[in-house]
Amino acid sequence: MRLNGLLVKTINHSTLKSLSLIAVFGALLGSCGSPSANSPTSPTGASPESPAAGKDFTVGMVLVGPKQDGGWNQAQFEGIQTALKTIPGTKLEYVDKVNVADRPNVKGSQVADDLISKGAKFVIFNSDDFKDDALATAKKHPDVTVIHASGDYAWKEGKNFKNQPNLGNIMGRMEYGKMIAGCAAALGTETGKIGYLGPLINDETRRYSSSAYLGAKYCWETYRKKKAENLNFKVTWIGFWFNIPGKTLDPTKVADDYYNGGYDVVMSGIDTPEAAVQGKKAAEAGKKVKFVHYDLASGCNLAPDICLGVPYYNWSFPYANSIKKAIAGNYTSEFTWLAPDWKDINNPETSMVGFNPGTALGDNKKFLDEFIKGLGDGSINPFKGPLNFQDGTPFLKAGETATDQQIWYLPQLLAGMEGSSK
């Protein structure tokens, strides 16, 4: 259906059972939060029972990029589909590609208004860029539960807390996933040159790229037995979560520049699969290169022979928990920030953050497994001092462990990294 010029797509619960998504990579473009040894922040209260079948409850989703982008948006879209399969009597309405390039002069809050006019009582905004749209929507529609994937407005201990009862945040502690990804990159490089394909610069992307560097540095020194100064970790920011022609750097060219410039491992920090696509082309041309994908569990399928792995989010169960609370009428604002389930980080029912190792790891997978085990039991914590910021000022003193707030609001990249901090 079309509302106010926007294509709003409706999926009933029964349709979800038969719907099969096919990832469209390459030409399609899409979008887009702190580790510690402490237990993860979890939703409070038990989830209520699902509603009776036949009592439709509409969930709306505002996606910043295409729902089949091979990354962030696809993982979000598949996550909400999986969640709704577990809750009878629900249906989904969504609008994707809500960004300045695809929908000029259209705000996320306007899209949410359209979804709510069609009966949505629960609305998800899936990008950091939507933080103010989510807050505005929650204020305008106090009877609607609004979830912002990423963001910190519901975090009472954060810097930006807003006391809005119907607004919540859901995010995974991807810092763990990024440290694992960085370790995989360090285990896979032969040149010691790792390129990181970054989106725009903000607190989230600084802490993610820095997490990847810390994981790489630890495994480079510990398992590869090499000096930190011989590790070249470079971040290139394209300017947004995905390519906007004329507005951002072209991630295809950035990836090619890495592969052609001696960087034999490229890590993706953006929503789309250029690191994989261009890596495959470089490998076919005879270059010994590898890549680390991001966001989507099936990301290694793009080029399995050269994939070192993929850190990914599992959105289905935290979304399902919040939807059930909203249906029962007892949802209250909460900041949900979930770490991996260290008993099995790839358990789709319990772990929001996972890592699928790639075949290109080879025998080095045993070192990655050791690193993951250490992160889980707390014997390894790369966010422990001494650590300096990129400009040489102290971040953590010797023996000091970073707090959640210090990592979430990381103001600079870390010493040893190449790339802009602002």
Image: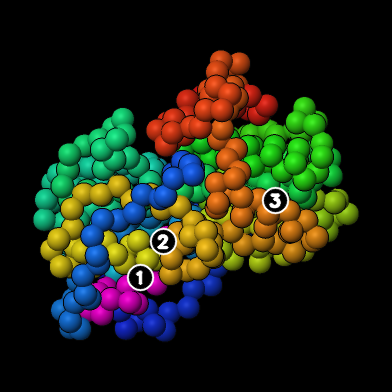
Q: Is 236 situated above or below 154?
A: above
User: From mark 3 to mark 2, how far is it between C-alphas?
Assistant: 23 Å
As displayed, is residue 343 above or below residue 399?
below
- Which contiguous range is marked in magenta? 76-91
| Type of amino acid at the residue the image marks with label 3 | Ala
Which residue of the protein is positioned furthest toward the right in this rendering?
Answer: 286
Q: Position of residue 320 (x, y in %)?
A: 31, 67
Sequence order check: which comes first, mark 1 or mark 2? Answer: 1
Q: In the rendered structure, which amino acid carries the disc numbered 2?
A: Trp
In the displayed structure, 388 sits above or below 291; it is: above
Amino acid type at mark 1: Ala
Q: 414 or 129, which is in the foreground?
A: 414
Cα–Cα gap, marks 1 and 2:
8 Å
Check whether the beta carbons of the residues at disc 1 and disc 2 lie within 8 A of each other: yes
Q: Main SS of the magenta segment? A: helix
Q: Secondary structure at mark 3?
A: helix
Instruction: Name the front one of labels 3 and 2.
Output: 3
Q: Give the secondary structure at mark 1.
A: helix
User: Looking at this view, is 101 or 314 the one in front?
Assistant: 314
- Secondary-structure class at tag 2: loop
Numbered circle sitting on residue 184: 3
For marks 3 and 2 on the same chain, the one whose residue lies earlier in the sequence: 3
Q: Which mark is residue 315?
A: 2
Q: Is residue 60 visible?
A: no
Q: Is residue 297 in view?
A: yes
Say whether disc 3 or disc 1 marks the residue closer to the N-terminus.
1
Kindly identify the residue that appears in the image at 21 percent across and 37 percent down: 162
User: In screen coordinates, is 37 left or right of 108?
Assistant: right
Q: Residue at x 85, y 54 (%)?
A: 285
Tell me the residue that label 1 is attached to: 83
